[in-house]
Image: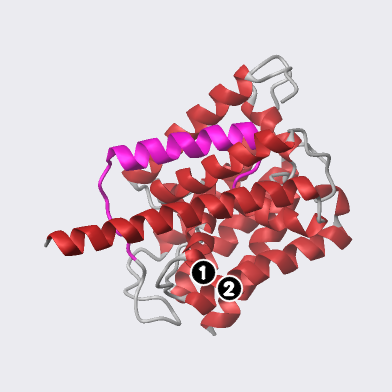
Amino acid sequence: MNAFLSLFCGFIFAVGLGLSGMTDPNKVIGFLTLNKDWDPSLAFVMAGAIAIHGTTYFLFRKQKKPFFAPSFSKPATSNIDSKLIIGALMFGLGWGLGGFCPGPAIVSTVSLHPKVGVFVVSMLSGFFLVNVITYMLSFRKDSIQ
Amino acid sequence: MHIYLPPLIGGAIIGLSASILWLGSGRVAGISGIISGIFQAQPTQYIHRLLFLFGLLIGGITLLFAYPTSIHVPIPRSIPALVIAGLLVGIGTKIGSGCTSGHGVCGISKLSTRSIIATLSFMAAGFLIATLLAGRSI
């Protein structure tokens, strides 16, 4: 059941992104550019998503465990630290520069447009780089202890 | 159709996806987290991550046939700009633990202070750079 849910949720997530306009970097840049031609329509994507997910979350707030799994996943940390802010600022700069955030970029790879491929390979390299550095730092910490 | 209707309906579908994944499997529909986890030294929930990715791609292929103008779009930025943008998005979402979906949709829906601050930060940075670059071809 969980396997099916992952596949199904990935599928409808992509359909939602496509319908919403998020897969069009011209629209994203039009939303992020504050000038006389400002196109606020993409603000409604987040509004629609939060309206549904926030309501679900509120209605099922007393739910002890998910329907098909032993427990709800918990965020690794609730700290508000410089990592969170610096990471978010870097992400925002990349989003405004390229016009893609991770989901729409991955969905758009099916167009086989080489520029989308360039963005996605760079993004995956970014993930990989941070993972490798984190992994190496964890070894250093282990050897100190 | 009103111009705000497709974003609202698309957003609602995204919210539905996040809700089903949360209530069914207890997982957060944060794309950067799900995808970047595939590239970890010791991946956890590997099958879930791959299946979600697979679902995204099948969704993309469906759009390609059902609503091709959502996928076949001119890409406004140059290749060097996209290389830098991709690196910033990859590194930034990894060290900031989330993107538009994980912080912007799932985190805010749970009224997480952490996600609200992250979302305000990346929105501000996005508005700033896009506005500064307006009218330039880069």
Which chain does tag 1 point to? B
Residue drawn where x is 49% and y is 57% of the image: A128
* Chain letter belonging to callout 2: B
| Outermost residue to the left | A145
Q: Pointer 1: what residue?
A: B21
Residue B111 location (% of width, % of height)? 37, 47
Task: Report the amino acid beneath label 2.
Answer: Leu
Q: Is residue A64 above or below residue A56?
A: below
**Residue A51 visible here:** no
User: For this rendering, which residue is in front, A73 or A99?
Assistant: A99
Task: Give, as a single range, the part of the protein colored magenta.
Answer: A74-101
Q: Residue furthest bottom?
A: A1
As drawn, the label of residue B50 is 2
Q: Mark 2, mark 1: which one is toward the viewer?
A: 2
Q: Is residue A60 magenta?
A: no
| Residue occupying image coordinates x 44% and y 51% | B94
Report the side of A89 relative to B14 (left or right).
left
Residue A143 vertical position relative to residue B67 in the rendered view, above or below: below
In the image, residue B6 above or below residue B38: above
Toward the top, the furthest residue is A36
